[in-house]
Amino acid sequence: MLGILALLACPRALPPDPATPPAPAPLAPMVSPTPRLLVLVVVDQLPIRLLQLPSELYRGGLALLTGDEAFVSTARYAHAITYTCPGHATISTGASPSVSGIISNDWYLDPVPGTDSIYCGDPSLLRVETLADQVMQAGGQVAAVALKDRAAMMLGGPRAQLVSWYDRSQGRFTEPLAELDLSRWMSEPWTALHPDVYQALVGPDDGPLESDPGLGTTFPHPAPDASTFLVTPFAGDALVDAALAAVERQHLGEDERPDLLALSFSQTDYIGHNYTSESWEALDGMVRLDASLDRLIEALQDRVPGGITVLLTSDHGSFPADKLRIPPDAIPNAANQALASAGFEGEVVFESPSIYLPEPLRGDPALRAPAATAIAEAVAALPGIAGAWAWRDTPVEGPYAEAILQSVDPQRSGEVYVMRAADALYDYPGAEGRGTSHGTAFPDDTDVPFLAWGIGVAPGHTSELLDVRQIAPTAAHLMGLRPPPSSQGSVVTQLLITP
Ligand SMILES: [Zn+2]
């Protein structure tokens, strides 16, 4: 399991303190020409190390987007809550969760145990405008298509003209793309394209840390059903079909006003969670993503000759899976014990990363502060926990203070923010000791590729660590538009062709 680290690790300069936000830079002179279609690609769970595979594996879209014609960089999330919804919201708004309001995938407003949590798959939960809004305000069209509902919604925002995602209960995309026939992607077994290379990189196919999503843990994997489809690279091909159908339907790229196609490939996230990033499945998934992206970019170039710009990034990375495991109940149990020892009644609710106090403790600062502080101390002492912060009541300090503060919202977050350590992973019930995850302020999770290619993009490879909050303003600038009003990042000027 260490093999891939040695093979793939690429020494990089020590990045700057994540607490330092990028200094606002003046807008560069308007680039010209602007693309007719900007394609914003999110690859869900794309750790930097998976982009650094031996170059013979990438011949398609990833080769183009990391090649001599492209702008190639690494961008870091300023926030600690490196989950899908916060990541997609930061990409689309240029703002941290503390500003966008998207503080996790799920949260509570009324944290009585047993009540339903709020799921982030609702674009009206976004507190700020998106890149999509800027495009539409300038008369452009927006289509957002993804394999996860929350990814499509966060990228499109509440007003996009077309938003569609893959519905696993139906085995098809939601309206208006429901008629798309996906059967050809669900009829074949999944075979490994380069078994010898994968063996050399990560060892045997049957890795001890892989969990079985219902397709087995060794190649060849059987043809998937509507649900296991998402754990195969064929779902990425289906997404390309859906994206091209959306382009046709909305007439994207057909007039002078720049349009936006935003898409999110989520199969990489499901593959990573189940099989880990250091698996034949993850490597083959990347090789096949490379081909899917190639087909997408070629088709879009045919349709919009000389008129597209492609940006690619990710909502988070992932950790190598050989880690200490934290049982699911360890955190709420420790919190409840601390509460009882401090003389308080009631039970907490833990919805990562938040611990919510029971009422009346939550609503009464005189009770809340001692209760939250006692819980934070007890949870921080657990094995595998990097820290726990009673952020409403005590100053947040230490190397991750700014990342924590960028991740919380007074209405939506709990009273204690919990972050696991770099040597640990949360365990999933039913898959104990297996699979991998993400969700911390450590570089394995926070650092993602930021690649750009096409109209208006100056090629170059930079070792300067960028901020993911720069992507939305940079995309807007490339399209000749204003940045989303709440974006916190500056335009990446070295990416722009200057007249
Ligand atoms: Zn994700």
Image (spheres, grey):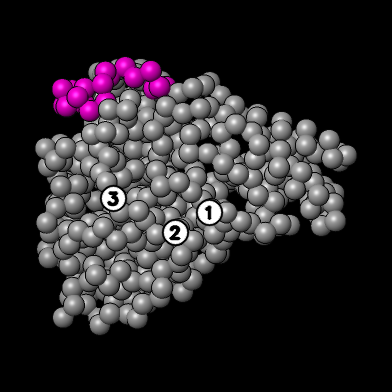
| Span colored in magenta | 194-211
Give coordinates of residue 305: x percent, y percent.
12, 63
Residue denoted by label 2: 17
- Kind of residue indicated by mark 1: Pro
* Residue at screen point 45% across, 58% down: 18
- Answer whether labels 2 and 1 touch (C-beta < 8 Å): yes
Image quarter in which the C terminus is found: bottom left
Q: Which numbered dot is residue 12?
A: 3
232 magenta-colored: no
Q: Is 456 positioned to the left or the right of 339 in the image? A: left
Where residue 406 appears, as percent x and y from the top left, is 54, 59
**Amino acid type at mark 3:** Arg
**Percent coordinates x, y for residue 239 in the rendering:** 30, 43
Distance between mark 3 and mark 1 Cα atoms: 20 Å
- Label 2, residues with CA under 10 Å away: few <14, some 14-19, many ≥20: few
Q: Is residue 394 left or right of residue 167?
A: right
Cα gap from disc 2 to disc 1, whole angstroms: 8 Å
